[in-house]
Image: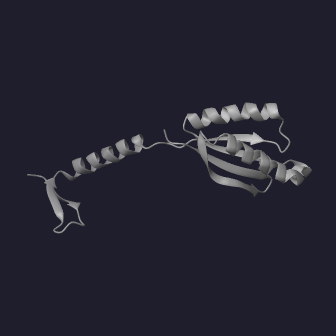
Amino acid sequence: MELDLVEISPNAKPPVCKAIDYKKFVYEQKKREKALKAKATKVTIKEIRFGPNTDDHDYEFKKKHAVKFLQDGAKLKAYVFFKGRSIIYKDQGQILLLRLAQELEEYGKVEQMPKLEGKRMIMFIAPKKK
């Protein structure tokens, strides 16, 4: 009959086998995996950069973009970049990021609190589920 004995579920007791064409079985399996992969959601990360002394108007402008990103379902990476000697204002940078987190509370939740990594203070915000 030109069929192969294929073990379908090896962990079952007794193991389940079928007499089918092996190449067709492998093809169907790959097709199923590809369909599952296509359905998986891809997480996009959007970045917003602040300076330690960002002005109120610039802050509001960037916050508006952050709201749009979170509503679109993207994660948000907000960071304060310290240039040169501005690292002495790291407390101002942290206050800025915490203020952003508080104002975006209804759109997303903080995944990682502000953390200083080199010359950047980074914070992640994940969108709330609809």
Count how many numbered circles sit on residues in the image.
Answer: 0
> Looking at the image, can residue 10 be seen?
yes
Q: Is residue 112 left or right of residue 94?
A: left
Q: Residue most toward the right? A: 85
Give me the residue at 86% from left, 42% from top: 53
Q: Residue most toward the left? A: 1
- Horizontal and vertical percent position of residue 127: 56, 42
Q: Is residue 36 left or right of residue 55?
A: left
- Horizontal and vertical percent position of residue 93: 80, 48
Q: Is residue 107 left or right of residue 62?
A: left
Q: Is residue 56 or residue 10 the one in the foreground?
A: 56
Q: Is residue 54 above or below residue 1?
A: above
- Horizontal and vertical percent position of residue 122: 72, 51
Q: Residue 4, located in which quarter of the rendered image?
A: bottom left
Give me the residue at 23% from left, 65% from top: 10
- Horizontal and vertical percent position of residue 91: 83, 53
Q: Is residue 103 left or right of residue 44?
A: right
Q: Is residue 73 or residue 97 the one in the foreground?
A: 97
> Looking at the image, can residue 4 be seen?
no
Q: Is residue 118 above or below residue 79?
A: below
Q: Residue most toward the bottom? A: 13
Q: Residue 36, located in which quarter of the rendered image?
A: top left
Give me the residue at 28% from left, 46% from top: 27
Q: Is residue 38 or residue 30 the one in the foreground?
A: 38
